Image (tube, rainbow, N blue to C red):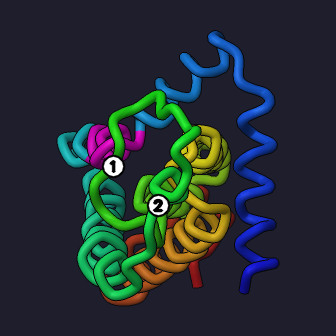
Amino acid sequence: MDFFMSMEYAVLDFLQTIHTKFLDAIMVFITSLGDAGILWIFIALILLVTKKYRKYGMIIAASLLLGLLIGNILLKNLVGRERPFASREDIELLIHAPRDFSFPSCHTLSSFAAAGSIYYMNKRWGLAALIIAALIGLSRLYLYVHFVTDVLAGMLIGLLIAYAMTKVAAVKFHVFPLDHERKVL
């Protein structure tokens, strides 16, 4: 376990070596897109108010809600993992120190739950959303507020939630992808 944790810190410490004022500002902005899932909630709301895409907005919203329940309410409290900066006095955070537990990264989980839902409905829009989600996950590492495994778990859980929600929508509610040549089933 010590070797594994040392590898996690090695990745985070490497990212500390590439800090610049410009990159710091970019990463703080990128991570703010994931604060409380605001970007993804905004996208879901835009879709919800349009009749043509309302069902897709509902899938994204449901994915975000399930991610909140699984990540923030269940797993964070069940695992209770300390954040990486908590054991390092030499780290100067660029954002306010999060007060909840580290595992999983819920910025990453919510981003991949929403972006994955978008991808399963529309490949082109989804690819752009997945890139944004990946950048949000990377920003959490760069800012030293999550371990690599927190971000990877958030990504995996988010994608599984997205898949499950789009599959349920396709089977139970006959909501199919916007890409008519792609099928969720």
Crowd rating for badge 1 (residues with CA inside 10 Å; few <14, some 14–19, many 20+): few
Query: Which residue position is annotated with label 2?
Result: 83
Check disc 2 and report its element: helix, strand or loop: loop
Check disc 1 and report its element: helix, strand or loop: loop
Query: Which residue position is annotated with label 1?
Result: 98
| Magenta segment includes 38 | yes
Q: Residue at x 71, y 24 (%)?
A: 19
158 is higher (above) or lower (below) than 80? above
Is residue 139 shown left or right of residue 44?
right
On the image, the x and y values in percent for residue 161 come to 45, 77
On the image, the x and y values in percent for residue 88 come to 55, 50
Of callouts 1 and 2, the N-terminal one: 2
171 is higher (above) or lower (below) than 24? below
Question: What secondary structure predominates along the stretch shown in magenta?
Answer: helix
Quadrant where the C terminus sits is bottom right
Disc 1 and disc 2 in contact, CB within 8 angstroms: yes
Is residue 49 shown left or right of residue 61?
left
Kind of residue indicated by mark 1 = Pro
Give the number of marks. 2
On the image, the x and y values in percent for residue 127 come to 67, 47
* Magenta residues (range): 34-44
Kind of residue indicated by mark 2 = Arg
Is residue 70 shown left or right of residue 73?
right
Q: Residue at x 62, y 48 (%)?
A: 141
